[in-house]
Amino acid sequence: MTDALHFDSVTKSYETEAGVVEVLRGISVALGAGEAMAVTGPSGSGKSTLLHLAATLEAPTSGSIRIAGQAAHDLPERELAAFRSRSVGLVFQDHYLLPQYTMLQNVLLPTVAAGGGGDGGEERARSLLQAVGLGTRIDHRPAQLSGGERQRAAIVRALINRPSLLLCDEPTGNLDAETATSVADLLLDLHAEGDSALIVVTHSLELAARLPRQVELRGGLLSEAPPRQAAGG
Ligand SMILES: Nc1ncnc2c1ncn2[C@@H]1O[C@H](COP(=O)(O)OP(=O)(O)OP(=O)(O)O)[C@@H](O)[C@H]1O
Ligand SMILES: [Mg+2]
């Protein structure tokens, strides 16, 4: 089966007035369809950079990246934007919901960007919002919701197009411990029900431990924790 994500010897450097910043120095990793992985590492180690590359928002300096088998970075910009909307869902630490739109409209935005819409998208949006406990909030705007409610809506929005890859950057970073746990529960439940592969960047070792694979970024390189033994083994 085609991997949801494949990084082969990926490097990323930024040229600044102060010189070249080498962030990623050769990352190779594959994530199978529907698999899930946590990425940890110190601040500044390149976790968000890695997600931006996987999201096709930035191009690697060298190496190759395939998303659902597609060398997406080779696509012309217009096609790349459509590919991204269809294939990648993104959840950031700050939810980035648009304040002028209702929850339903926010959640449906990616279907418009993907050139879809009209194919049961609204029904799916309503039922997902219902499923994450926002059934009574469908016509509310972000400012009328709590942080945890907004983050749940952001997760629904990221999943609306059934992406092959769901990327979350500190999805629980701004939430109190109890809300963080319930948002993490929701994210893992939705992942288990769908076909999206999942990457969660987090400083929370507790959240990382809930995912079946854990990798750590340090010094521009990725290391993977050995597979866990079954409980009691
Ligand atoms: N556009 C840019 N130009 C120059 N340097 C950059 C740019 N974007 C990121 N960096 C540098 O790349 C490094 C990695 O940044 P990144 O945001 O990926 O870290 P991170 O692991 O997500 O950190 P945090 O845990 O604090 O969110 C940092 O040292 C940052 O300063
Ligand atoms: Mg970051």
Image: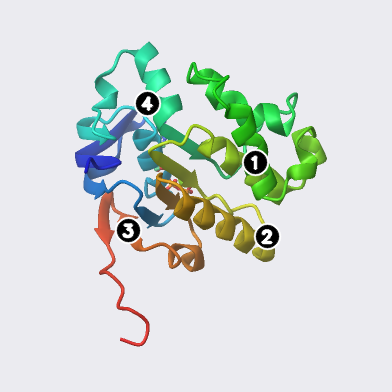
Circles 4, 2 touching at the beta carbon (< 8 Å): no
Decide which of 22, 222 is in the foreground and name it. Answer: 222
Which callout, 4 or 1, points to the residue nearer the camera? 1
Find disc 4 in the rendering and name its residue: 17
Q: Which image quadrant for residue 105?
A: top right
Instruction: Label 3: state its secondary structure.
Output: strand
Tell me if residue 167 can be seen.
yes
Q: Amino acid at mark 3?
A: Val
Q: Is mark 3 within 8 Å of ligand 1?
A: no
Q: Amino acid at mark 1?
A: Ser
Q: CA distance from mark 1 to mark 3?
A: 33 Å
The residue sitting at the bottom extreme is: 232
Q: Residues within 10 Å of mark 2 (few under 14, many from 20)?
A: some
Earlier along the polypeptide chain: callout 1 or callout 3? 1
Residue ID at (36%, 49%) = 34
Residue 219's spot in the image, x, y percent?
Answer: 29, 53
Find disc 2 in the rendering and name its residue: 179
Find disc 1 in the rendering and name its residue: 127
Decide which of 155, 173 is in the foreground and name it. Answer: 155
Earlier along the polypeptide chain: callout 4 or callout 3? 4
Instruction: Label 4: state its secondary structure.
Output: loop
Residue ID at (31%, 46%) = 33
Q: From the viewer's perspective, tell me whether residue 182 is left or right of residue 144.
A: left
Q: Amino acid at mark 2?
A: Thr
Q: Amino acid at mark 4?
A: Glu
The quadrant of the rendered image in which ligand 1 is seen is top left
Q: CA distance from mark 4 to mark 3?
A: 32 Å
Q: From the viewer's perspective, tell me whether residue 92 is left or right of residue 148.
A: left
Residue 62's spot in the image, x, y percent?
Answer: 19, 31
